[in-house]
Image (cartoon, rainbow, N blue to C red):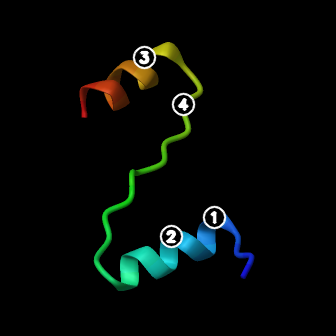
Amino acid sequence: MKIHEHQAKEIFAKYGIPIPGNYVCRKVEEVLEVYKK
């Protein structure tokens, strides 16, 4: 079976499997904020 990443994330979420968050950073300051989380 071949599935896309977003489909796998939906399946994982359905069964309570933790997945890392995704962030888009456009500035260095944003990278530092995300890193602190």
Q: Position of residue 22 (x, y in %)?
A: 48, 48
Residue 9 is labelled as 2
For this view, does 6 lie left or right of residue 31? Answer: right
Q: On screen, 31 above or below 19? A: above
Seen at 49% across and 14% down, the residue is 28
The Cα–Cα distance between marks 4 and 1, rounded to whole angstroms, is: 20 Å
Name the amino acid, label 1: Glu
Q: Earlier in the sequence, mark 4 or mark 2?
A: 2
Q: Secondary structure at mark 4?
A: loop
Residue labelled with disc 1: 5
Residue labelled with disc 4: 25
Q: Earlier in the sequence, mark 3 or mark 2?
A: 2
Residue labelled with disc 3: 29
Name the amino acid, label 2: Lys
- Number of other residues with Cα within 10 Å of mark 3, as a class: few under 14, some 14 to 19, many 20 or more: few
Disc 3 to disc 4: CB gap under 8 Å: no
The Cα–Cα distance between marks 2 and 1, rounded to whole angstroms, is: 6 Å
Seen at 54% across and 19% down, the residue is 27
Q: Position of residue 36 (x, y in %)?
A: 25, 26
Q: Position of residue 3 (x, y in %)?
A: 70, 75
Disc 2 to disc 1: CB gap under 8 Å: yes
The Cα–Cα distance between marks 4 and 2, rounded to whole angstroms, is: 21 Å
Seen at 33% across and 83% down, the residue is 15
Residue 37 is labelled as none
**Looking at this rendering, what residue extends furthest in the front direction?**
1
Q: Quadrant of residue 25?
A: top right
Disc 1 to disc 3: CB gap under 8 Å: no
**Looking at this rendering, what residue extends furthest in the top direction?**
28
The Cα–Cα distance between marks 1 and 3, rounded to whole angstroms, is: 28 Å
- Number of other residues with Cα within 10 Å of mark 1, as a class: few under 14, some 14 to 19, many 20 or more: few
Name the amino acid, label 4: Cys
For this view, does 16 lie left or right of residue 24? Answer: left
